[in-house]
Structures are given as C-alpha cells and as structure tokens.
Amino acid sequence: MNKKLYKLMNWADIEEIIYSECDHPQDLLGPHAATGGTLVQAYFPGASAVSVKWLSADPLVGDQVTQMEVADEDGYFAVILPEKKVFNYTYSVTYESKSVKKTLKKKTVDLGDPYRHEQILKKADIDNFCNGNMSDAYKLFGAKVMSHAGEKGVLFSVWAPNALRVSVVGDFNNWDGRIYQMKRIEGGFFELFIPGDLAGSKYQYEIKLKGDIIIKRNDPFTLALEDGVSVISLPTQYKWNDTAYMKSIKSKPTNLLIYELSDNHFSTDAKKLDKDIDKLIKLVKMQGYKYIQLNPQLKDESGVVSFSYAVNKSFSDSATIKSFVDKCHANDLGVIMCWNPSGFGRAENGMEFFDGTALFEHQNHLQGISADGKKMLYQYGRPEVISFLMSNGYYWAKEYHADGICVSNVAEMLYLDYGKTEGAWIPNIYGDNENIEAVSFIKKFIKELNSASGYIFTIAEDSSTHKGITTSQDEGGLGFDYKWNEGFIGEFNEYMSYDPINRKNLHYKLVDDFIYSYAENYICPMSEKINAGIESLNSMYPGDEAMKKAAIRLAVAFNYMHPGNKLITETVDSTNSKLCSALNKLFEHEVAVGKTNNDPQSFEWLSNMNADGCYISYVRKTDDPEDMMVVICNFAGIEQTITSGVPYEGKYLEVLNTDETVYDGTGIVNKDEIRAGSLSADGRPQSITVKLAAQSMTIMKFIPYTEEELAKVIEERIRNFTPVKKSKNK
C-alpha cells in the first residue's frame, strides 16, 4: 500500500469494522473527501481483489475500472482517487479458493456500495415514531424495495436502540454479519440501503450485544416468513375496484350478520385459491350474511400472532387478501379484520428481548408475560410501541379496505391481573388492576382510526365486565362500536353442557343474561375462539349424536333470537346451513328480531321461572303488535307440550321450528295456526299451547284478528258464556 493512502487510513476504526463492532460504518466505508481527492474504502470478507467499476451512461466510452489496494488481508480494500466527486459505481469483487500451488475456484461478482448514500429516513419521521404519533410506520420501516439515487435496492431500517451493532444478513451475503453493518441514526434506529435485486430473498438482523453476544432477529415489520425467516416482499401494486363501495360507507351498520372464516379455510394451492374465494363469497351471499370476518395475521404453533404484519399462509400473500376484499365489496359483502394488539408470540428469533432488552414488552416478567406464558405483553407506556401498534392497526384497516376491525383479547389488555394469581402481577399507580396505559392506547387508536376518511367500525372481542366498552369517549367510555357478548355464550354453553335432567339447578344461567343484554352494543358470537365451533359443541353437549345435533340447532336458534348482532363461525354454519339461512332471513326481514338490538323495550319475558320443566318463553317486539314474535324453547331431553301465556288474543303462526325435517330434525312441528285461548298462563289472561321436540325451539309470528274474525270471536264467546232465554209458552 502506498504511503499516502496508508496515512489517510483510520486503522482503529478499520479494526472496529473488521471485528464487526461498528455502528457507524458510513464514516469509513464508501467515498469520503480526502487530501488530494476522494478516499474509497470497502470491506468484503474473504475477497482476494476488488475494483471500482465506474458506470458510464455513454456506451461508446464504456465502464472504467480502478483497482483497489488491499489494506487488510481479511478483505478490507481502499483506493485514493484524484476526483473530488464520484458518481455511480459498483464494486467488482473477486473471491478465490486456493490450494498450496494453484487456484481451485474463482468467481467475480458486481456489488453495489451501501455506504455511498446519505441517510434516507427523515429525522421528522423518526421523531414522529419515537413520540408515539405515527400511524403509517409500515410505509417507512422494515425492508422496503425501492429506487434511490439511480440505484434499485432495498432500504433496511430497524429500531434497536440498545444494540452495539446491527447487520443485515441473508441468503444474498451468505448470512455473514460482517458485510452489511448498518448505520446508527436518530431515535435508536439503524439504516442501510443495499443495492441489488433482493426481492424474495430471506433476511434477518444480526445484533451484537455487550459481552460479544450475537443474536439474530426477524424483522418486526416483515410481511412474510419462510422457514421461520423474514422474506423481502415487493410492494403490492394492487388496483382496487371498490371506490364506489368505500364512498358509500359513512356510518356504522345497525345490524350485523357475520360469517366467521376459519384460520386455514383456503387451500395453499395457488391454482385453487381464486376458485375457493369465488365459491366462498357465493356461499356466504346465498346464506344471507352481510359480513365476512377473517384472521389475516400469521400465527405460530401455539395460535399466537408473532409478527404483526405477516400474512396468514392460507391467503398466500397480501395481494390475495386485497383481491378477496375487493371481490367481497363487489358482492356487497363487508369484511372485518381480526387484529391482536395484546401481545406477541415467543417465537425463536422473534420480538422478545429484540435488542437484548425488553423493547416491545415490559422488563418485569410480572408485567411482560401472559398468564399462560405463551406470549409477551406489549408495553403500552412506551411511545415507540404505540406508534408500532397504531401503524399495525392502520395497516390492516386502511391498506386492506376493511369495513371493521375486531380487536382480539381486549380483556387481557384492560386488566393487569388477567388470568393471573395473587402476587403474579403488579398494580397500577392507583393500586388497582386496570391497565391505564392500555386504555389510553385503545382510546387513541379508535379516535384516530376514522379521522382521515370513511368509517371503519370497531369490535371488542372482550370477555370482561369492564363498563363502557361501547359507550362513546365523550361520555367516558372506550368508544368501541360493538362488543362480543362472551358472557352470554359462556353461561349458555355451561348450561347446555349438563344432561337435561340436571339443568334445572342451572336455570339462572339461562335467564340471567337477559338482564344485561342491552348494557352494551353486543354481538352474540358463536366463534371458534370461545369454544363455540362445531367440534367444541359436539364434545361439550351431552347425549347421542341425534341429541347433540338437536342441542346445537337449539343453540344456534337461541343465539339468533337473543338480543344482539350475530356472528356464526364457518363450522357451525356448514353443518347447519339451512337453519342459519332461515334465521338470517328472519333477522334481516323481521323488524322485531334484527332491528331492535339496542332497545330494551323490544324484549319481554313470558315464562322464565319454569326450571323444573326446562323451558322458557319470551317475546321480541316493537311498538307495532303485528311485528311481534313469540319464542318458546324446550331445553328438556324429552318431547313436551308447553302452554305459554301470550300478550294478545289472536292467531300465532309457526314460522320456524328447529325440529323441522329440513333441518335434520324429527318433524315435531306446529303446522296449523294456533288461536290464543282464554286459558290464563304466566300471568296472562290468554295463552297458546305448542308441541316441542326434545331440545328444540319454535318461533311464532303474531297475526291479529281481522275485524270480521274478531266479531266472530266475540259472538262465539258471548254465545258460549251467555244463556239465551227460551220461551215456555207454546
């Protein structure tokens, strides 16, 4: 090496790079002004020779090559150029494997210089993220395929404030952490723009900690994983066709009929995927549902979301989800995305202790780990975590044109002691169990979600008794539009899990829920998430196969006739498709069933005290008597003839019976109109009597008498109860 070049070299910092301990490689590597010109330095471990290839735009001139000198045999090269400014260039890097006497293998590759560019990320954006005020971080951070300063490549950026050094490793650099050491910039971020066509390549971040500890971590912003490793994804260039549909959404819907899609519904065969999607949409539309709810986030083997942006493999990629949503909107079907901001899975090379410290989670294990130990809980008091989560929620809502967002595990977010025993959690500053920081985050997310445009309703998948979940924030509530009524489903399923002969002692579980059915704007969920899938119900409900099927039909109908919006999981609908279709039509067209979910006056008990008989009856109604529906449920394990009081004299026509043969029942139904008789029952002066199969429900529509019919009834009653004078004279 010539003396002039030798004197320009910073040998202490070069050693730092060679030992891969550098968080400021840009200060040495790449082009830098020097006495007499420009000093260019490069580090390619294992290379035998490196040249600078100047890229000419003039084909007649061609590319010019300048040989670099070996500064260190480990692969550090340098050259001093007379030019004060250098333009586009690449490195021509030669690798050799030698024996004692000869070269065994030799290859030369052209590689771009990641260190010739200035910082790309803007300080204002980084500050915004670090202040907890960013909702589109997914557009900036992670691995972004882009063009910069005339070069195509990938901008890598990662938040790792406590790392000594971070490198990008992947199958494009033989997973060698010495090659692409990243630049430390503001806010604890590391950045590096690597030139080249890297789309589809696997990558990770190699992080060096104190004590020479090296760990590898997947990208928290990764959109896909393959073999447990992050994959560089091309930006989705999807052209939406639902502009008119999206503009028409201006407020939350008043009644929901939701079809919950199972996590792994679609075939992984890409050729079948489009046909599967078209088939599903046609089915859901035919069944009468208004929304499809899906779980788009990738889950680990324990069922926990580990990487918030990664797509469920059932959907293949983000473009497939967008196409799915677009097709739903074309068929006037809304889409609800499930989103889990409560925590993340403990996957190998995941987000846990990301930079050697508790970055996304709490440091204290009493705060940072879920009760079952399967996931880490987010630290909602950290602004950077708020930006990460806000952006993740916006990503699934905005980027995928969602109609609604269903926030999972809300109870686990709201309570510090969720599922934990005494001494296994830390109270808040007031000494109680509410997670104040999580409440603040939820309110912030809901408030800002719709601030831009349109209306995206929010659902709380919540099992807690926390008050005001669906109360507006102006009135002190959290501001969700809907809440799952998990308490109702849980109590009901516990009641149904007992043999009918023993249910009388649990009658309160059947009827008490109606007391608070209007406390929130509820959705009644028969969901896989709360053990209401068909397999769970089959294992939970007692009896032989026929009894189980009857009980499930009764459970489905009971859910529909209970106050609240409806969610039916795919497995329950598929085994009860005709019944669900009929109930959807009732919900859609009968005002007293589907349009009165927020009105306590729409429900009235007829009989709720007959625990020994294992039956109940009630009314769904409006101000118009002609809208009234009478519901009578037989929860006994035997056929019964039940007399129930009714509000009015008149005719009652059975519009649905869960034991109809069309629903795979035994056919014990009430075919003819039933006229309310003058026999008093349940405190009413009139009643009707129906036959009900074991574990079945009948829904009766009230039909008032016509004036002519009423006159005949009055005449008949007068004749039956009034003696007529008979003349004794001949």
Image (cartoon, rainbow, N blue to C red):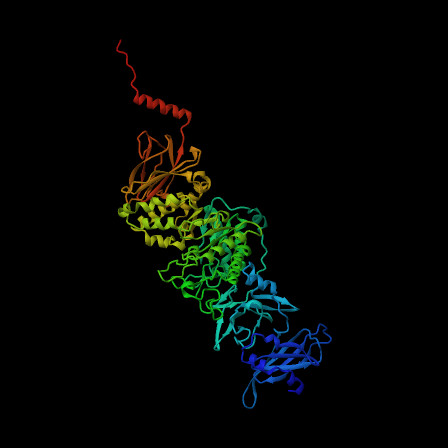
Q: Is residue 634 above or below residue 189?
A: above
Q: Quadrant of the N terminus?
A: bottom right
User: Residue 364: x, y in percent?
Assistant: 42, 66
Q: How many discs appear?
A: 0
What is the residue that sits farthest to the front in this orientation? 430
Q: Is residue 285 left or right of residue 682?
A: right
What is the residue that sits farthest to the top in this orientation? 730
Q: Is residue 184 above or below residue 542?
A: below
Q: Residue at x 56, y 80 (%)?
A: 16
Q: Quadrant of the C terminus?
A: top left
Q: Is residue 88 left or right of residue 430?
A: right
Q: Is residue 452 above or below residue 19?
A: above
User: Residue 209: x, y in percent?
Assistant: 49, 74
Q: Is residue 519 visible?
A: yes
What is the residue that sits farthest to the right in this orientation? 60
Q: Is residue 323 above or below residue 683?
A: below
Q: Quadrant of residue 626?
A: top left
Q: Residue at x 37, y 45 (%)?
A: 513
Q: Quadrant of residue 302?
A: bottom left
Q: Quadrant of residue 579?
A: top left
User: Residue 342: x, y in percent?
Assistant: 45, 59
Q: Is residue 276 visible?
A: no
User: Residue 291: x, y in percent?
Assistant: 48, 49
